[in-house]
Structure formats: C-alpha cells, structure tokens
Image (cartoon, rainbow, N blue to C red):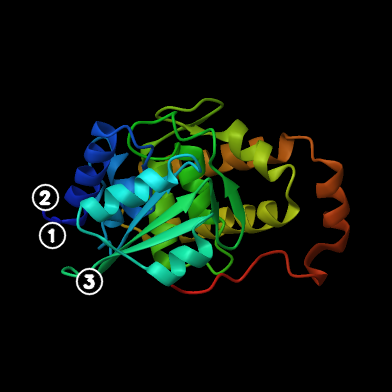
Amino acid sequence: MDGILPGIVDEGRRVLARADDEDVTLRLLGGVAVVLRARNGLPEPFVRAYQDLDFATSRSAAKGCASLLRELGYEPSVQFNALHGNERLLFFDEEHGRKADVFVGRFRMSHQIPLEGRLALEPLTVPLAELLLTKLQIAELNEKDVRDSLALLHGHPVSNEDGDTVNGARVAELLSDDWGLWRTFTGNLAVCRDHLARYDLPEEDKRLVAERIDTLVERIEAEPKSRAWRLRARIGERKRWYETPEEV
C-alpha cells in the first residue's frame, strides 16, 4: 500500500493518478486545485497553506471512490458517510491531521453547484468555471477564498469556453436560474475586486484581474434571467437566500 504523502499538493496528485489508473472518476477542487491549474506556479501574493483535500466524483463512481481512498490509506467517517453518502463522503488522513472531502454529483455548501456531467472535461480538477463558483458561492467569504479566486482570475482569462479559461457562459447560465446564487456570487466578485489592491502585484496585473472580473460581471448581467430568478428577485434580501452548512 502506498503511504500518504506529507506534501498536500503531491498527495493530491498521487490520489488523482491512482484514480486514473483504476478508471475512477475523481477531480480536485478547492485550494489545491487552484495550485494545479496554475501553469507557471502561483504568484507569491497568492501562495498560502492548504489544510485539506477536496474532491468531486460522480454518483456512479462514488462507491469506487470510497474504496480507492480506503486503499490509499484514508479512514472513512463511517457515521457521516452513512448519513450523507448520497451527496458527500468524508475521509481522514490521521497521520497528517488532514481530511479528504468528496462531493458526489454536486457541490453543496451555501449554494448548490451541479457537477454531474462536467467532471470528464478536465483530467485533474473540476472545470475552471465550477472551481470559481465553488469558491465564490460562500455566503461568509473569507480571505483564503478571496485569494484563491483572484489567483484563478490572474492566471486565466474569461471566455465562453472550458479548458484553460473561465467559462463565463457556464457561470452566467447557472446564475440566471438561481437568484440566491447570483446574489452571493456577484457580491463576492465585488469584494474580490475591492480587495485586489491589498495584494502585492504589479499594477498591470491588478488591472488585468479587474478587467477579467468586469468581463465576467458583464457576461452574467447580459444573460436572460429565468422566471424563477425574477420571482425570487422580487423578494430580495427580505428572505435569506443561502444555506448555512454545518462544519465537519
């Protein structure tokens, strides 16, 4: 049995390589995914420590994913997995004090981001659109999520395609049918833009990231909104528009 590696990014690569060898659908998300998608490494202002591994798998691959992680040395949270295994699995790396979180078919925290059918588009991580969405769907945004989101937009332009760009069309499509997600995501984009000046980047880089944020906002606002979106917008913030996930 291979031992769990102390370096979390190297460990993420190890798990993905084994999943690929065994034809198990598994993709990284979270901060380690941001690192893996940085073609030339992260600029120093965006470098941070990473505590846990976050993965996504499909519903059909969830059983195989659970078996794989056990084989790789991870201890399952038996009670949590029995209660929530249809949408989320939890495993522990006891030696290094880390956990591996696996989202099944969708990412659900403050909001829900569908992942089923999108996991085959990239070999290592969820697509960049979903990676950014999972970062900015958080109702109570923290500094690490701002940092990771800015790192993504620093390293990748916004377009209407997947691959090495943030697919603005995909983001706009999901937000156009969910006012709550739209409210949280666009509000968090504004926070990221406001905080950009805090990071020690060349002015040219700051302008580039700000332009990419503006491009994404324009794409989102141009997307026709669904009837459900318009009806929910009438209620606005008088009713809470996000979930409060439990800590695990």
Q: Which of 82/101 is in front?
A: 82
Apparent side of residue 32 relative to residue 176 in the rendered image (left or right): left
Q: Earlier in the sequence, mark 3 or mark 2?
A: 2
- Mark in front: 3 vs 2: 2
Q: Mark 2: few, some, or many residues within 10 Å (few <14, many ≥20)?
A: few
Q: Is residue 237 above or below residue 216?
A: below
Q: Which residue is mark 2?
A: 2
Question: Quadrant of the rendered structure where residue 165 is?
Answer: top left
Residue 240: give x, y in percent of width and height.
74, 70
| Identity of the residue drawn at 83% across and 55% down | 233
Q: Which residue is mark 3?
A: 97
Q: Earlier in the sequence, mark 3 or mark 1?
A: 1
| Identity of the residue drawn at 34% across and 31% down | 123
Kind of residue at badge 1: Pro
User: How far apart in space, not on screen, are marks 1 and 2 (Cα)?
Assistant: 12 Å
- Mark in front: 1 vs 2: 2
Kind of residue at badge 3: Gly
Kind of residue at badge 2: Asp
Q: Is residue 237 above or below residue 115?
A: below
User: How far apart in space, not on screen, are marks 3 and 2 (Cα)?
Assistant: 18 Å
Q: Which residue is mark 1?
A: 6
Q: Is residue 76 above or below residue 112?
A: below
Residue 30: give x, y in percent of width and height.
39, 53
Apparent side of residue 225 relative to residue 167 in the rendered image (left or right): right
Q: Mark 3: few, some, or many residues within 10 Å (few <14, many ≥20)?
A: few
Residue 15: give x, y in percent of width and height.
24, 46
* Quadrant including the C terminus: bottom left
